Amino acid sequence: LAAAFAADPAPWKPRTIASLQSSQEQTLDLIRRAIARVPEAERQAFWNQYITSDTLLDPVRGTPGFGSLDREYGKAERRPSEND
């Protein structure tokens, strides 16, 4: 549904658009709740391992809410350097 809307939003009725937005917000809320259950020190790794690789989340990746979560948790993991 989200992919079809993104491809051509013109034929969609306002009620369908509202339903899509509601589903996206529910998805983002579930992601937030899942992250909240992960110890803070492990959240970035959780994001990188599970959220970024889950293709079922593709329809919400372009939303402002997902972008906000990605900026908070999607930072590149620091790799040890030779000097460590």
Image (tube, helix red, strand yellow):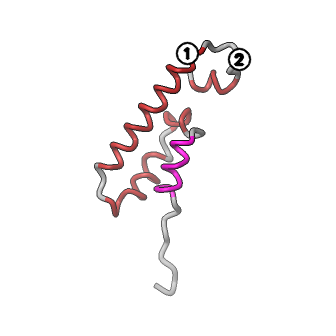
Magenta: main secondary structure equals helix
Can residue 67 be found in the magenta stretch? Answer: yes
Q: Label 2 near label 1: C-beta < 8 Å?
A: no
Q: Which span is picked out in magenta? A: 64-74
Label 2 environment density (alpha carbons within 10 Å; few <14, some 14–19, many ≥20)? few
The N terminus: image quadrant = top right
Question: Would you say 77 lies left or right of 46 here?
Answer: right
| Front position in the image: 28 or 46 | 28
Residue plotted at (55% across, 36% down)? 58
Disc nearer the start of the sequence (1/2): 2
Give the amino acid at mark 2.
Answer: Ala
Expressed as whole percent of the image width and height from the top left, the position of residue 77 reads 48, 65
Residue plotted at (53% across, 21% down)? 18
| Front position in the image: 26 or 54 | 26
Residue plotted at (39% across, 37% down)? 29
Q: Is residue 36 above or below residue 83?
A: above
Give the amino acid at mark 1.
Answer: Thr
Q: Quadrant of residue 2?
A: top right
Q: Find residue 66 and name its label.
A: none
Location of mark 2 (residue): 10
Residue that sits furthest to the bottom in the current view = 83
Q: Is residue 65 above or below residue 9?
A: below
Location of mark 1 (residue): 16
Expressed as whole percent of the image width and height from the top left, the position of residue 9 reads 68, 21
